[in-house]
Amino acid sequence: MEAERIRKQERRARQTPVERDIEREDNRNRQQARRSVQTPEERQTVRQLNCERDAASHAAQTDEQQAASQALDR
């Protein structure tokens, strides 16, 4: 997860301002297209699934950090 975040930061650092603007616009258009075909109930379901995914990801990351910390303590 951390490696992915770093890769994104490095890629963004290499981008020109114009490329960043294009990427932002593309993301905005993609989001808008997704919203236009979803009902409010579908959006709520997606939000709920995203929250569950984020909680699971956070828990996994915390577990990894604890395991690494314990390994260093030995």
Image (cartoon, rainbow, N blue to C red):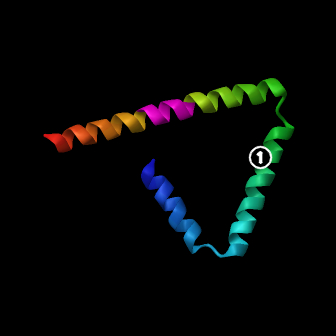
Q: Position of residue 66 (x, y in %)?
A: 30, 36
Magenta residue span: 53-59
Residue type for callout 1 = Gln
Residue at 65%, 76% in the rendered image = 16
Q: Nearer the viewer, residue 37 or 24?
A: 24
Q: Position of residue 39 (x, y in %)?
A: 84, 28
Residue at 34%, 38% in the rendered image = 64
Q: Nearer the viewer, residue 69 or 52?
A: 69
Residue at 33%, 40% in the rendered image = 65
Mark 1 Cα-neighbour bin, 10 Å: few <14, some 14–19, many ≥20: few
Q: Is residue 61 left or right of residue 49?
A: left
Task: Please tell me whether residue 30 is drawn above or below residue 44 in the rendered image.
Answer: below
Q: Which residue matches tag 1?
A: 31
Task: Please tell me whether residue 4 is drawn above or below residue 53 in the rendered image.
Answer: below
Task: Please tell me whether residue 6 is drawn above or below residue 52 in the rendered image.
Answer: below
Q: Residue 68 lies in magenta, yes or no? A: no
* Residue at the front extreme of this rendering: 73
Quadrant location of the C terminus? top left
Q: Disc 1 on helix, strand or loop?
A: helix
* Residue at the left extreme of this rendering: 74
Q: Position of residue 21 (x, y in %)?
A: 74, 67
Q: Nearer the viewer, residue 38 or 71?
A: 71
Residue at 41%, 38% in the rendered image = 61
Q: Position of residue 22 (x, y in %)?
A: 75, 66
Task: Please tell me whether residue 74 is drawn above or below residue 5 in the rendered image.
Answer: above
Q: Residue 55 lies in magenta, yes or no? A: yes
Name the chief secondary structure element in magenta.
helix
Q: Is residue 47 left or right of residue 66?
A: right
Q: Is residue 39 left or right of residue 10?
A: right
